[in-house]
Image: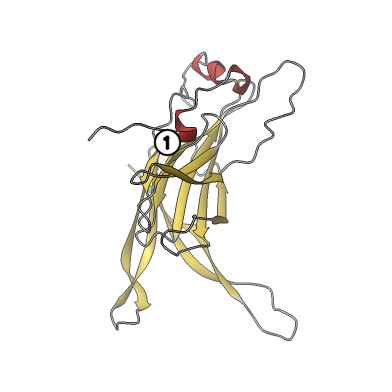
Amino acid sequence: VRWNVRGLACARPHPFLGIEDTFRRVSDGSKRRLGAAGAVAVDPIDGAIVMNGVHGTGTVQMYDAANDRHLSDLTVAQRNVVSRTQNERLAPTVVEHICFSRDGHDLITVDRRTDPKFDDAVSLKFWERSSLAQGSAAAYTINTRVESPHKKFISALCCGSYRGGGRSKGGGEAAVPLVVTASHDSFFKLWTKQSTELAPRVGGDVASTAVWSCQSTVFF
């Protein structure tokens, strides 16, 4: 079987995006060169391949490899791709890591914005899928955003689950989603989804929602 990448992921970066600036940066203790992003994941619900869109724009695309068609795009990092100051090029943003929860309901991304004049800006984002029907275009809404989750860039991201979240409908222990991030700062962090109460509504009803937070930090 021979695979050909089509759509936005194969688009050649234009000099306007400022991609070549990232290759001229000198790697030191806190920065590294921003090369081609290798973030690729498979949607557990519909089997779509999720990968970077146009390099440097902070987007990911969902691609149906079986039918050779583009499904949808997700803007992970908002940015103005039109305006710029004088002749300065826009600082590129690349989604470096992507992973899904086992049920496909949660999507986790790590994006990094590289600016020659400032320190790299890294964001860890947790997304919720708003359409779970198989065959429908996947749509996501942001649930939790963490700026600078580590002191240095994130080298690994993985998703899983563990038992201990109360009782499931079948009577067994419910699986709790778990996300692990590892960094060159010699720490890895465990992120879990926990319920929190919102401000009371009109009438006294108290609503709750589930958000992600760091449960543990481990030095290695």
Give the number of callouts: 1
Is residue 157 in view?
no
Type of colouring: secondary structure
124 in relation to 90, above or below: below
Is residue 89 in view?
yes
Residue 203, image x, y percentages: 74, 86
Residue 165 falls in image quadrant: bottom left
**Quadrant of the drawing holding the C terminus:** top left
Q: Residue furthest front?
A: 67
Residue at 55 percent of width and 21 percent of height: 19
Secondary structure of the residue carrying numbered label 1: loop
- Report the side of 172 relative to 58 (left or right): left
Residue 49, image x, y percentages: 38, 45
Q: Which amino acid does label 1 sit on?
A: Asp
Residue 142 falls in image quadrant: bottom right
207 in relation to 11, above or below: below
Which residue is more in the foreground, 74 or 157?
Answer: 74
Residue at 53 percent of width and 55 percent of height: 139
Residue at 54 percent of width and 16 percent of height: 20
**Quadrant of the drawing holding the N terminus:** top left
- Report the side of 175 relative to 132 (left or right): left
Q: Residue furthest top?
A: 24
Residue at 40 percent of width and 59 percent of height: 104
State the residue position of label 1: 185
96 in relation to 129, above or below: above
Q: Which residue lies furthest to the left in this view?
A: 1
Residue 45, image x, y percentages: 37, 59
- Report the side of 103 relative to 124 (left or right): left
